[in-house]
Image (tube, rainbow, N blue to C red):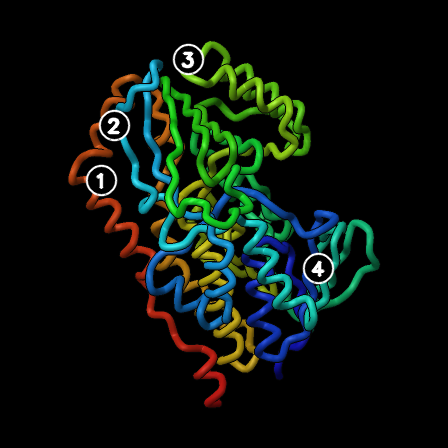
Amino acid sequence: MRTNTVLISGASIAGPALAYWLNRYGYAVTVIERAPALRTGGQAVDFKGETHRTVLERMGIVDDIYAHRTGTTDTVFVDDKGEQVAFMSGDFTGGDVEILRGDLARIMYEKTVGSCEYIFGDSISGLTETDDGVWVEFEKGAPRQFDLVFGADGIHSRVRRLAFGPEREMVKYLGHYYCVAGASPWAVKPEGAPQRITAHAHNTPGRFASSGGQKAQHWFIFAAPELDYARGDVEAQRRIVKETFAGMGWEVPNMLADIDELDDLYLDSVSMVRKMKSYSKGRIALVGDAGYGNTLGGFGSGAAMVGAYVIAGELALAGGDHTVAFARYSEIMRRYAKMAGSANAGRFLAPKTAWGLKFRNWFLGSFLFDMMFKASVDAKNNIDLRDYPALVGAN
């Protein structure tokens, strides 16, 4: 018997993408998002390779994404005096096309809002699986029952915590934090803006500070033990960054002065979801960072889009039998997402020792970096991507 009603938690990337595909295959879709409205801005995300492009083309959003692309950012690493010590190509960090997370979310939201129900300003507080569905309780709204529930709510997923266990058992801290502050000057790209720009970055052991790129006006990464702070306390986050980077040279003092005036500031840990045997439990499944996230790993946005495409397609092919579809989805995505488990951007961008910094700078100019670049592209295409729309249409 075909499953009809689904609830998706999260309206960033994986959620609207999943809403599109499930609705296309005939499901009644509700998306719930704890933010009061669709989130705009945010750091840039990217897509790279044939697999990513194929999914975007099948969604019909390639032209929209290219119309809102941010361009490519090369990074020049400098010393205290501003002299170049290393260079990192934007072709490695930015993929084939880069777009602000908020612009991507808006594109997919506009593609689905007419046919899917969106609820903002609320979140899931309880999940109870029954014989014929999942009874869902909300922080504000009245309880409802759905046939399936999907957690597309990021690396700090509430759905994962409620269904699979505490975050501390599911997410591994990788030893660094990152902070993005302020929208990039190219966030809304004026006519004639350059397709390629240069950001500058400065390191001391365990600290990385960058300014002028597409991701944000200022970007910080630092090594630290796990910190105790409220994720919603922006003033505490400002204080942590200013105390951590106090005394650093180059333009960092000016950058720290700027963050007092910037409203768009976000601090979070560099963490990864531990390898899971399955991305589903009964009628509940995880998509995107909730299931296979790795902060700053360069894999998240593409994996979220691919994961949404695969799980919806497998459900359609299985005629709504979630036990068959979810098992197949977990098998496919565990193989594809394994690249995410090997990267640690914090350790690469903010090595904890002076020797580590020297090695990183040498590595960026070596043939080994070129090999890593090629391997990352290959990994993002390492999936047997089925043509679900054609297969479903043939049934």
* Mark 3 nearby-residue class (10 Å; few <14, some 14–19, many ≥20): some
Does 195 appear above or below 137?
A: above
Disc 2, SS: helix
Tell whether 307 sits left or right of 37: left
Name which of mark 2 and mark 4 comes first in the sequence.
4
Residue 336, image x, y percentages:
36, 59
Q: Residue at x 53, y 61 (%)?
A: 280
Name the residue tied to disc 2.
361
Tell whether 141 sits left or right of 341: right
Name which of mark 1 and mark 4 comes first in the sequence.
4
Q: Identify which amino acid the numbered label 4 is placed on.
A: Thr
Disc 3, SS: loop
Distance from Cα at disc 1 to Cα at disc 4: 48 Å
Name which of mark 1 and mark 3 comes first in the sequence.
3
Q: Residue at x 17, y 35 (%)?
A: 366
Name the residue tied to disc 1.
369
Tell whether 258 sits left or right of 384: right
Name the residue tied to disc 4.
128
Q: Residue at x 45, y 63 (%)?
A: 306
Q: Identify which amino acid the numbered label 2 is placed on.
A: Asn
Q: Identify which amino acid the numbered label 3 is placed on.
A: Gly
Between 348 and 261, the residue placed more toward the observer is 261
| Residue 179 seen | yes
Distance from Cα at disc 2 to Cα at disc 3: 18 Å
| Residue 326 seen | no
Between 21 and 254, the residue placed more toward the observer is 254
Name the residue tied to disc 3.
249
